[in-house]
Image (tube, rainbow, N blue to C red):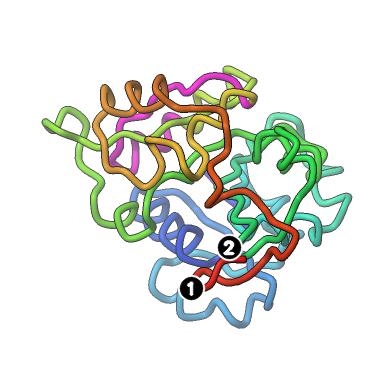
Protein backbone atom coordinates (compact mmCIF):
# COMPACT_ATOMS: atom_id res chain seq x y z
CA UNK A 1 0.00 0.00 0.00
CA UNK A 2 1.14 3.55 -0.68
CA UNK A 3 0.87 5.78 2.39
CA UNK A 4 1.36 9.54 2.47
CA UNK A 5 2.34 11.07 5.80
CA UNK A 6 2.05 14.82 6.40
CA UNK A 7 4.15 15.58 9.44
CA UNK A 8 7.43 13.97 10.46
CA UNK A 9 7.49 14.68 14.18
CA UNK A 10 7.35 12.05 16.91
CA UNK A 11 4.22 10.25 15.72
CA UNK A 12 4.74 10.88 12.00
CA UNK A 13 8.35 9.73 12.15
CA UNK A 14 7.50 6.56 14.02
CA UNK A 15 4.56 5.75 11.76
CA UNK A 16 7.00 6.10 8.87
CA UNK A 17 9.28 3.58 10.59
CA UNK A 18 6.51 1.13 11.41
CA UNK A 19 4.72 1.26 8.05
CA UNK A 20 7.91 0.82 6.04
CA UNK A 21 8.97 -2.03 8.32
CA UNK A 22 5.84 -4.02 7.39
CA UNK A 23 6.29 -3.40 3.68
CA UNK A 24 4.32 -0.28 2.80
CA UNK A 25 5.69 2.43 0.52
CA UNK A 26 5.69 5.69 2.47
CA UNK A 27 5.84 9.23 1.08
CA UNK A 28 6.62 11.58 3.94
CA UNK A 29 6.42 15.38 4.09
CA UNK A 30 6.91 18.17 6.59
CA UNK A 31 6.60 21.95 6.61
CA UNK A 32 10.32 22.47 6.04
CA UNK A 33 10.68 20.61 2.77
CA UNK A 34 11.85 17.21 1.49
CA UNK A 35 15.54 18.05 1.84
CA UNK A 36 15.15 18.08 5.64
CA UNK A 37 13.92 14.45 5.62
CA UNK A 38 17.00 12.81 4.14
CA UNK A 39 18.01 11.11 7.39
CA UNK A 40 14.55 9.60 7.92
CA UNK A 41 14.46 8.51 4.29
CA UNK A 42 17.88 6.87 4.56
CA UNK A 43 16.83 5.06 7.74
CA UNK A 44 13.48 3.80 6.49
CA UNK A 45 13.44 3.81 2.70
CA UNK A 46 10.56 6.30 2.69
CA UNK A 47 10.40 8.89 -0.09
CA UNK A 48 10.65 12.57 1.00
CA UNK A 49 8.06 14.69 -0.79
CA UNK A 50 6.18 17.97 -0.49
CA UNK A 51 2.96 18.22 1.49
CA UNK A 52 0.98 18.37 -1.76
CA UNK A 53 2.72 15.26 -3.09
CA UNK A 54 2.09 13.37 0.16
CA UNK A 55 -1.64 14.08 -0.12
CA UNK A 56 -1.67 12.75 -3.68
CA UNK A 57 0.67 9.77 -3.30
CA UNK A 58 -1.20 7.45 -1.02
CA UNK A 59 -4.04 4.98 -0.76
CA UNK A 60 -3.98 6.29 2.81
CA UNK A 61 -2.86 9.76 3.94
CA UNK A 62 -1.94 10.46 7.56
CA UNK A 63 -2.18 14.05 8.82
CA UNK A 64 -0.04 14.24 11.95
CA UNK A 65 0.73 17.89 12.67
CA UNK A 66 -0.07 20.24 15.58
CA UNK A 67 -3.75 21.12 15.68
CA UNK A 68 -3.10 24.82 15.23
CA UNK A 69 -1.19 24.10 12.01
CA UNK A 70 -4.08 22.34 10.27
CA UNK A 71 -5.52 25.68 9.18
CA UNK A 72 -2.20 26.47 7.48
CA UNK A 73 -2.51 23.57 5.04
CA UNK A 74 -3.64 24.47 1.50
CA UNK A 75 -7.43 24.68 1.35
CA UNK A 76 -7.45 22.59 -1.84
CA UNK A 77 -5.01 19.98 -0.53
CA UNK A 78 -7.43 17.09 -1.07
CA UNK A 79 -9.49 18.61 -3.87
CA UNK A 80 -8.15 16.26 -6.56
CA UNK A 81 -7.60 13.27 -4.29
CA UNK A 82 -9.96 10.34 -5.02
CA UNK A 83 -12.73 9.76 -2.51
CA UNK A 84 -11.41 6.24 -1.99
CA UNK A 85 -8.25 7.58 -0.30
CA UNK A 86 -8.51 7.22 3.48
CA UNK A 87 -7.37 10.21 5.57
CA UNK A 88 -6.20 9.57 9.13
CA UNK A 89 -6.01 12.31 11.76
CA UNK A 90 -3.67 11.61 14.67
CA UNK A 91 -3.96 15.06 16.21
CA UNK A 92 -4.73 16.23 19.72
CA UNK A 93 -5.87 19.65 20.91
CA UNK A 94 -3.58 21.25 23.48
CA UNK A 95 -5.05 24.74 23.94
CA UNK A 96 -3.16 25.74 27.08
CA UNK A 97 0.13 24.21 26.06
CA UNK A 98 0.51 24.80 22.28
CA UNK A 99 -2.54 25.48 20.14
CA UNK A 100 -4.39 28.36 21.72
CA UNK A 101 -8.17 28.42 21.72
CA UNK A 102 -10.00 26.86 18.78
CA UNK A 103 -13.53 28.03 19.44
CA UNK A 104 -15.53 25.26 17.70
CA UNK A 105 -13.63 22.67 19.75
CA UNK A 106 -14.14 24.67 22.93
CA UNK A 107 -17.86 24.70 22.08
CA UNK A 108 -17.98 20.91 21.90
CA UNK A 109 -16.98 19.85 18.38
CA UNK A 110 -14.70 16.83 18.51
CA UNK A 111 -11.10 17.51 17.55
CA UNK A 112 -11.14 15.27 14.49
CA UNK A 113 -14.52 16.57 13.32
CA UNK A 114 -12.94 20.02 13.33
CA UNK A 115 -9.90 18.72 11.44
CA UNK A 116 -12.18 17.18 8.84
CA UNK A 117 -13.95 20.49 8.30
CA UNK A 118 -10.59 22.21 7.76
CA UNK A 119 -9.41 19.55 5.33
CA UNK A 120 -12.81 19.39 3.62
CA UNK A 121 -12.47 15.66 3.84
CA UNK A 122 -13.81 12.86 6.08
CA UNK A 123 -11.15 11.61 8.48
CA UNK A 124 -10.58 8.62 10.73
CA UNK A 125 -9.12 9.31 14.18
CA UNK A 126 -6.33 6.94 15.25
CA UNK A 127 -2.83 6.79 16.74
CA UNK A 128 -3.54 9.82 18.96
CA UNK A 129 -3.69 8.23 22.40
CA UNK A 130 -0.34 6.40 22.47
CA UNK A 131 3.10 7.76 23.25
CA UNK A 132 5.28 7.89 20.15
CA UNK A 133 8.00 5.75 21.72
CA UNK A 134 5.44 3.09 22.63
CA UNK A 135 4.06 3.16 19.09
CA UNK A 136 7.54 2.32 17.86
CA UNK A 137 8.54 -0.28 20.45
CA UNK A 138 5.47 -1.96 21.92
CA UNK A 139 3.86 -3.58 18.87
CA UNK A 140 3.46 -7.38 19.14
CA UNK A 141 2.25 -10.16 16.82
CA UNK A 142 -1.47 -10.83 16.73
CA UNK A 143 -2.54 -13.25 19.46
CA UNK A 144 0.22 -12.26 21.88
CA UNK A 145 -1.22 -12.25 25.43
CA UNK A 146 -1.60 -8.69 26.70
CA UNK A 147 -1.13 -7.17 23.24
CA UNK A 148 -1.81 -3.44 23.44
CA UNK A 149 -4.82 -2.00 21.64
CA UNK A 150 -5.60 1.31 19.96
CA UNK A 151 -9.01 2.95 19.42
CA UNK A 152 -10.14 3.89 15.91
CA UNK A 153 -13.09 6.24 15.36
CA UNK A 154 -14.74 7.23 12.09
CA UNK A 155 -17.97 7.51 10.16
CA UNK A 156 -17.22 5.39 7.09
CA UNK A 157 -17.00 1.64 7.79
CA UNK A 158 -14.75 0.87 4.82
CA UNK A 159 -12.29 3.62 5.72
CA UNK A 160 -12.27 2.58 9.35
CA UNK A 161 -11.62 -1.03 8.33
CA UNK A 162 -8.52 0.05 6.37
CA UNK A 163 -7.15 1.90 9.39
CA UNK A 164 -7.90 -0.96 11.74
CA UNK A 165 -5.99 -3.28 9.43
CA UNK A 166 -2.98 -0.94 9.55
CA UNK A 167 -3.17 -0.85 13.35
CA UNK A 168 -3.07 -4.64 13.42
CA UNK A 169 -0.20 -4.82 10.92
CA UNK A 170 2.08 -2.70 13.09
CA UNK A 171 1.42 -4.74 16.18
CA UNK A 172 -1.67 -3.52 18.03
CA UNK A 173 -5.24 -4.76 18.45
CA UNK A 174 -7.64 -2.29 16.80
CA UNK A 175 -10.75 -1.36 18.77
CA UNK A 176 -13.74 0.19 17.02
CA UNK A 177 -14.38 3.39 18.97
CA UNK A 178 -17.54 4.40 17.14
CA UNK A 179 -18.29 7.39 14.96
CA UNK A 180 -16.19 10.53 14.66
CA UNK A 181 -18.63 12.30 16.97
CA UNK A 182 -17.75 9.67 19.59
CA UNK A 183 -14.02 10.32 19.20
CA UNK A 184 -14.08 12.63 22.23
CA UNK A 185 -13.73 9.37 24.17
CA UNK A 186 -10.08 9.15 23.08
CA UNK A 187 -9.15 12.84 23.34
CA UNK A 188 -6.62 14.14 25.91
CA UNK A 189 -7.89 13.91 29.46
CA UNK A 190 -9.90 10.72 28.94
CA UNK A 191 -9.14 7.32 30.54
CA UNK A 192 -7.70 5.83 27.32
CA UNK A 193 -5.37 8.75 26.60
CA UNK A 194 -1.71 7.98 27.24
CA UNK A 195 -2.49 4.55 28.71
CA UNK A 196 -1.13 1.19 27.56
CA UNK A 197 -4.20 -1.08 27.59
CA UNK A 198 -5.27 -4.32 25.97
CA UNK A 199 -8.43 -4.51 23.87
CA UNK A 200 -10.81 -4.99 26.81
CA UNK A 201 -9.02 -2.26 28.72
CA UNK A 202 -9.50 0.14 25.81
CA UNK A 203 -13.19 -0.73 25.56
CA UNK A 204 -13.67 -0.18 29.28
CA UNK A 205 -11.78 3.12 29.16
CA UNK A 206 -13.83 4.39 26.23
CA UNK A 207 -17.06 3.42 27.98
CA UNK A 208 -16.09 5.24 31.18
CA UNK A 209 -15.04 8.51 29.51
CA UNK A 210 -16.72 11.80 30.36
CA UNK A 211 -17.61 14.20 27.56
CA UNK A 212 -16.77 17.22 29.69
CA UNK A 213 -13.34 18.52 28.71
CA UNK A 214 -10.96 18.66 31.67
CA UNK A 215 -9.52 22.06 32.69
CA UNK A 216 -6.01 20.92 31.69
CA UNK A 217 -7.19 20.62 28.09
CA UNK A 218 -9.56 23.61 27.97
CA UNK A 219 -8.40 26.97 26.67
CA UNK A 220 -8.24 30.13 28.74
CA UNK A 221 -8.10 33.80 27.79
CA UNK A 222 -4.31 33.63 28.14
CA UNK A 223 -3.79 30.49 26.02
CA UNK A 224 -1.45 29.28 24.74
CA UNK A 225 1.50 28.95 27.03
CA UNK A 226 3.93 26.07 26.75
CA UNK A 227 3.96 22.45 27.87
CA UNK A 228 6.22 23.51 30.73
CA UNK A 229 4.03 26.50 31.65
CA UNK A 230 0.46 26.07 30.35
CA UNK A 231 -1.66 29.23 30.15
Q: Name the residue under label 1.
A: 228
Left or right of 100 in this view: 26: left
Left or right of 227 in this view: 84: right
Residue, far left: 145
Instruction: Give the label on residue 28, or none.
Output: 2
In the picture shown, does residue 37 fall above or below 230? below
Q: Nearer the viewer, residue 132 or 231?
A: 231
In the picture shown, does residue 42 fall above or below 202? below
Badge 1 crowding class, 10 Å Cα cut-off, few under 14, some 14 to 19, many 20 or more, is: few
Name the spot of residue 141 as percent of width and height, x first: 20, 38
Specify which label sits upstream in the sequence, 2 or 1: 2
Q: Which of marks 2 and 1 is in front?
A: 1
Secondary structure at badge 2 equals strand
Residue 74 figure quarter: bottom right
Instruction: Work out how far the residue at label 2 is from the one at label 1, CA to CA, in angstroms.
Output: 29 Å
Residue 124 figure quarter: top right
Quarter occupied by the C terminus: bottom right
- Asked if residue 149 lies in the magenta stretch, the reply is no
Residue 85 in view, yes or no: no
Amino acid sequence: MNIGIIGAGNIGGNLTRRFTAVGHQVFVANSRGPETLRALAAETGATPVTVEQAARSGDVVVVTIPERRVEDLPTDLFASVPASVVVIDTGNYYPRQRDGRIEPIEAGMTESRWVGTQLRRPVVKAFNNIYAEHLLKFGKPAGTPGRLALPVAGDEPDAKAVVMRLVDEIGFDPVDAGSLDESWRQQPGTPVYGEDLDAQGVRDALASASKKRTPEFSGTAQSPGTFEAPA
